[in-house]
Amino acid sequence: MKILITGITGMVGSHLAEYVLADHRDVEIHGLVRWRSPLTAIQGLVPRVTLHQAELRDLNSLILLLKKVQPDRIFHLAAQSYVPASFEAPADTLATNVIGTTNLLDAVRHAKLDPKIHICSSSEVYGQVTQEETPIKETNAFRPASPYAVSKIGEDMIALQYFLSYGVKTIRTRMFTHTGPRRGDVFVESAFAKQIAQIEAGVRPNPMKVGNLNSIRTFADVRDAVKAYWLLLEKCPAGEVYNIGGEETMSVGQMLEMLKKMARCPIQHEVDASLLRPSDVTLQIPDSSKFRAATGWKPEIPLQTTLRDLLDYHRNRIK
């Protein structure tokens, strides 16, 4: 079997490649990269995967790539995934996530291939929900609170449209908060862990800077998430959509306190107004029962372990 991972150099893509190499050694892994993509996250994997340069915004490059690789499965993980950046560059976010996904699906059609395709939407599509709407089901209304969320609705819906109109075998996921080693520095739990590691090392002073600590999140480990994605294409039918999320729910402030207790020195924090979003999603608790019933998946890695591994990841980067 041959698989193609877009976004292979990111946190999720690199962990997915690692998981496949460890547990499915008969699988041939191909990754889509841009010429400027940093390879740090997959440095140890490069000899064991095949990388191809292509651009999601260039349909022809994707057609040529797919005709060459002819993958049996595609994990479409590449995206502009940072919510605050979408407020600064909404058109770029829409172009990457909506037009890029459309090009990928169109390339599959033009190449006359029939792979199963995982389209990675987001829990952000649900926006701000009420307490009565939790845990959030796949049938919940869309209320996007950022250009990023709008782009993910577009990605989600174009994937459904290509299934309905052309029979392209897309399966969509709306993954809730997931994190772990290699998480980008700009995301909240990774930004916290990085600052703590820097304060420990004496390269930045107390207090660390934080944004909104009142948002409620349900956390999952990225290593559990990639197992879920693999099971998705193994067991789920095309055309479906699934919420996927962890089991540990708490405020961002409570998550911060967990990290601070792991620190090697006292850590203080203060709110930085520049880290507050123009509009925010403050309540995200998933109902993953549909996916769990379809696959038997359940998260295995506790948040305590996830956060410790994330903190150690940033400690090691300082050395």
Image (cartoon, rainbow, N blue to C red):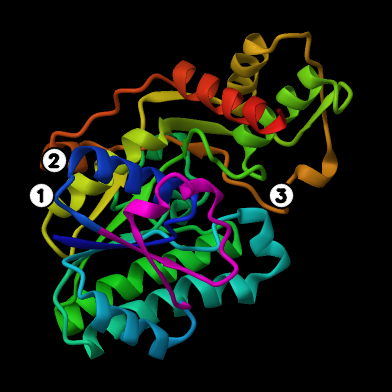
Amino acid tagged 1: Lys
User: How many numbered callouts?
Assistant: 3
Seen at 64% across and 22% down, the residue is: 256
Seen at 54% across and 19% down, the residue is: 308
The residue that disc 1 covers is 235
User: Which numbered disc covers residue 295?
Assistant: 2
Q: Is mark 1 on a helix, strand or loop?
A: helix
Q: Say which label, 2 or 3, has the lower sequence index.
A: 3
Q: Are marks 1 and 2 in contact (CB under 8 Å)?
A: yes
Query: Viewed as shown, does residue 263 lie left or right of 176?
Result: right
Say if the magenta span includes residue 97: no
Residue 17 appears at what percent x and percent y? 33, 48
The picture quadrant where one finds residue 159 is bottom left
Residue 24 vs 262, above or below: the answer is: below
Quarter of the image containing the C terminus?
A: top right
Residue 133 appears at what percent x and percent y? 39, 40
Residue 292 appears at what percent x and percent y? 18, 36
Seen at 59% across and 65% down, the residue is: 147
Q: What element carries label 2?
A: helix
Q: Which residues are the magenta region?
A: 29-55
Q: Which of 133 and 262 is in front in this view?
A: 262
Quarter of the image containing the N terminus?
A: bottom left
Seen at 48% across and 16% down, the residue is: 304
The residue that disc 3 covers is 277
Say if the magenta span includes residue 44: yes
Amino acid tagged 3: Arg
Q: Residues within 10 Å of mark 3 (few under 14, many from 20)?
A: some
